[in-house]
Amino acid sequence: MRVFAAVAQLESFSVAARQLALSPSRVTRAVAALEARLGVALLQRTTRQVRVTEAGRRYLEDIQQVLAQLSEAEAAATGSYLIPRGLLHLTAPVLFGEYFVTPQIVDYLAHYPDVQIRAELIDRPVNLQEEGIDVAVRIGHVPEDCQHLTVPVGEVRHVVCASPEWLAQHGEPTHPLELETLPTVVAEGSSFGSQWWFEEAGKHIEVTPTPRLRISAIHAALTAVETGAGLTRLLSYQVAASEAEGRVRRVLTRFEPAAIPINIWITAGRGRAASVRTFVDFLAERLRADPALGYRA
């Protein structure tokens, strides 16, 4: 089951073999034996790719809980509920993970030498149970039907900024609607789309800028703005370092919409492991202490 789950999720026998520390032939034989016992094809194989069949997709969904329960039983038997050890699998958004999570991972590993961490920094939605995630850092409101434990660690805002030099030359906008006629930079890798939204006295204001520059990476958009390309709209944590060092200045702050919470998610059934408990406590303390994330107790 574990071998099949790894191949199905990674869509590769060779990559799964490396992750599982098994030979490719052993991985191939394990999946073939499972298919033979079940009497159904779980994977479609070609020379270029591996894809899960419909039967394989249903089987993968069904065995996730079985594998989670097995991992818990093994952790209890080996004492991992008492001593932090073993592999911890986490995910976080790309830039947030680079700026705020990765440094804490390094510090945590220095404190707990028996723990290994696999960190996936990705911006796509992740099904925590299906992809075997133990801990996730997420920016956004927690759904009411969420089955996972969440720990609040801060908040972020949508902010508009420009370089001080550009503002000195062109003046500071006083209302969001002015952005429709001002030079703007849009990071197409962000989630803002073609509309920028603001709030004024409880009313929603939607602005459609006509960007002079569209660029595929948030880092690059911020660099362009720092060097005088105009105004951009990003999340506050993405511009925090540039703002602190005076390379950009926020504008239209009184029109900023409500803050968006940042939470650490603990996948249901994973919170008893000592590695998960200690990592979440360690990360939460560090993130809450960072002024860029504006945690409010």
Image: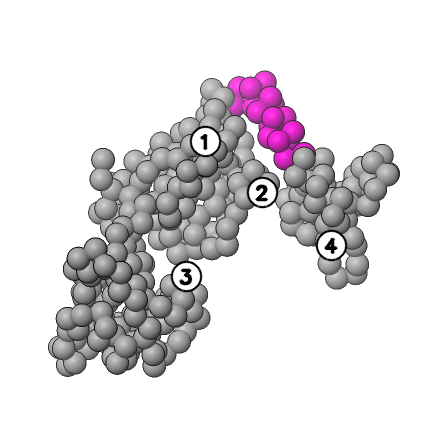
The residue at the point 41 percent across, 61 percent down is 191
Gap between marks 1 and 4, in whole Å? 32 Å
Q: Is residue 25 magenta?
A: no
* Residue at the spot of label 4: 50
Query: What's the mark number on residue 276?
Result: 1
Compared across the picture, whether 192 is left or right of 120 comes to left
Taking 107 as reference, is 52 above or below it? below
Residue type, numbered disc 2: Glu
User: What residue is rendered at 18% in x and 66% in y?
Assistant: 251
Nearest to N terminus: mark 1 or mark 3: 3
Secondary structure beneath disc 2?
Answer: loop
Q: Nearer the viewer, mark 2 or mark 1?
A: 2
Q: Is residue 276 left or right of residue 163?
A: right
Q: Is residue 166 above or below residue 46?
A: below
Q: In the rendering, which numbered label is found on residue 191?
A: 3
- Residue 233 spot, x, y in % from top left: 30, 66
Inter-mark Cα distance, 1 to 3: 30 Å
Query: How many neighbours does mark 2 have within 10 angstroms: few (below 14), some (14-19), or many (20 or more)?
Result: some
Amino acid identity at mark 3: Ser
Cα separation, mark 3 vs mark 2, equals 23 Å
The amino acid type, in three-letter code, at marker 1 is Val
